[in-house]
Image (cartoon, grey):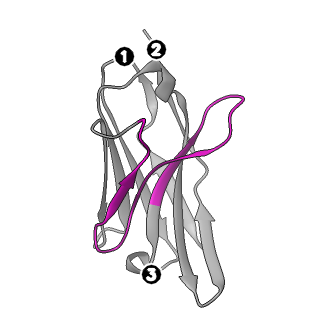
Amino acid sequence: QVQLVESGGGLVQPGGSLRLSCAASGIIFSWYVMGWYRQAPGKQRELVATVTSEGTTKYADSVKARFTISRDNAKNTVYLQMNSLKPEDTAVYYCNAWRMVLTNKYDYWGQGTQVTVSS
């Protein structure tokens, strides 16, 4: 059974920082691209950042230079360091793991963790 368990969300003031973690089980972690997505009220889920097993990263323009994604393959964990947080970063943040095997996509999601940026 695949599980992605996020932690680290909460309430933070504008300009503050948070570090999200996502612990994966039930998968061979190093085979998967790991990512963070977010969904604000009334909006579609959007990509925040992804990281391949080799460490190649990709970021949404809105978070570049503020957020850093990283992974520890030995701990089966992916992280999202969020700095200089803005009210518009408020959303539920979801962890994602995916890989392709030929034409089959294996795609898993965590339950989400709330991040609220407010004074």
Q: How many angstroms separate mark 1 from mark 2 (CA)?
A: 6 Å
Which residue is the site of mark 1?
14
First reached walking from the N terminus: tag 1 or tag 2: 1
First reached walking from the N terminus: tag 2 or tag 3: 3
Q: Would you say residue 52 sits in the magenta stretch?
A: yes
Identity of the residue drawn at 37% across and 69% down: 52
Residue 28: which disc?
3
Residue 118: which disc?
2
First reached walking from the N terminus: tag 1 or tag 3: 1
Q: Amino acid at mark 2?
A: Ser
Q: Nearer the viewer, residue 59 or 108?
A: 59
Say what secondary structure mark 3 lies in: loop
Residue 50: which disc?
none
- The magenta segment: 35-62
Report x, y in % for residue 69: 33, 52
Report x, y in % for residue 41: 67, 28
Asked if marks 1 and 3 touch (Cβ < 8 Å), the reply is no
Marks 1, 3: nearer the viewer: 1
Q: Amino acid at mark 3?
A: Ile
Q: Nearer the viewer, residue 68 or 23?
A: 68
Q: Nearer the viewer, residue 51 or 95?
A: 51
10 Å crowding of disc 3: few (<14), some (14-19), many (20+): few
Asked if marks 1 and 2 touch (Cβ < 8 Å), the reply is yes
